[in-house]
Image (tube, rainbow, N blue to C red):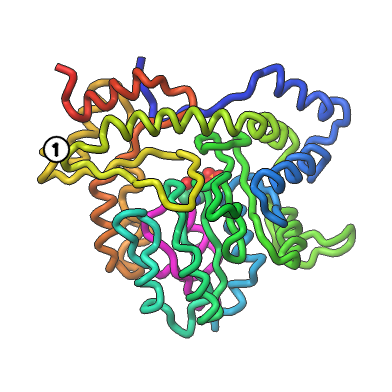
Amino acid sequence: MPIYVTRSSMPKLEDYIEEIKPIFESHHLTNMGPVYKKFQSQLITYLNVPELSLFVNGHMALEMAIQALGLKARGEEVGGGEVITTPFTFVSTTHAISRNNLKPVFCDIDPDTYTMDVNKIEELITDKTVAIIPVHVYGNICDVHKIETIAEKHKLKVIYDGAHAFGETYLGEGIGNFGDATMFSFHATKVFHSIEGGAVAFRDKRYGVPLHELKNFGIHGPEETSAIGGNAKLDEFRAAMGICNLRRIDECIAARKAVHDRYFERLEDVEGIKLCKPQEGVTPNYAYFPVCFDKDKFGKSRDDVFSRLREHDIYSRKYFYPAINELSCYKGQYNMNTPVAHDVSMNILTLPMYEELDLSDVDRICDVIIENNR
Ligand SMILES: *Cc1c(COP(=O)(O)O)cnc(C)c1O
């Protein structure tokens, strides 16, 4: 049996049917109906955030959070505003900036957490900088306090891409409470999902109306459309899936923890392999299991390990590779001086990680990596 890098968690079919019955009865399929509202209120409780707006996916949530915060307006001309972000992320983060006619300015990353290197942010700030968009990579939490200090000093907005950080807390606070806004993704491959889906958590109530209207064409009332919005509404069926999965989230994370712990035990002391250490003060969600290879010490490169795993029908992922500023749609147009992100992208591999992954399969994967199997 092949082992894939991920496998979506599923609720019991009967639970889902139970949850969608009222939708069949009401014929209310979308446009922020009762299931949407129920899901929203359950998430506010679970994530421990004051305000939350739901979206059809995480990407549109981020695009519209950028718009709702009015970042576009602060650039001198269209495309004038600069946003400091990381090149070590999924393309969505950078696309959301670019598609808002803002300019991504790439800040290098920390070699241990792979999140934005907070000591390199200030040198990138210019009079055109409007915001910082950092990413909680693999669920590793950014240095949120340092970022807040920098943002306050330079009057910048902060939007976190928290696609990997669902349900995490830092010093007892829900991770969606930092910065001006945090995006979460509920894509099928994430720790928590609603098939497709996403959210923006925020503290300032004033963002509620723009977020709500932007995802519904900018419609303000029956005869008034006050913004040029799009369509990014989460429908009732996906909200129902979210409700079912939220019920199981704690057991899902516990199962991932067991997988994580087994990997850790097997790989921690292997020369030339670097793992992410648990972060102090963070309740992790075990979203991914990234491994960084040092070819000189380990004897094999990341690409060698990737291929060897494939020969054994095991699918790992070069995540993230290439770094975003090396992709053809961005390459050469923005600053390329991010050597740590480049190095990490060349040497990192995320191993299979999902709720139902057997510990015996984790052993099989580790055996192949350390060539313990023949
Ligand atoms: C998944 C992901 C997104 C996009 O979320 P979708 O719900 O798939 O649109 C954005 N950023 C990061 C870091 C992601 O992993």
- In magenta stretch: residue 99: yes
Q: Position of residue 246 (x, y in %)?
A: 65, 34
Residue displayed at 16% across by 25% down: 371
Residue displayed at 22% across by 37% down: 269
| Quadrant where the N terminus is found in the figure | top left
The magenta span reads: 78-105
State whether residue 224 is above or below residue 288: below
Q: Which residue is mark 1?
A: 300
Q: Amino acid at mark 1?
A: Lys
Q: Position of residue 80 (x, y in %)?
A: 50, 78
Does residue 4 appear to the left or right of 230 in the view shown?
A: left
Query: Can residue 90 be seen?
Result: no
Does residue 213 appear to the left or right of 12 in the view shown?
A: right
Name the foreground residue: 190 vs 311. Answer: 190
Does residue 372 appear to the left or right of 147 in the view shown?
A: left
Quadrant position of residue 15? top right
Name the foreground residue: 246 vs 211. Answer: 246
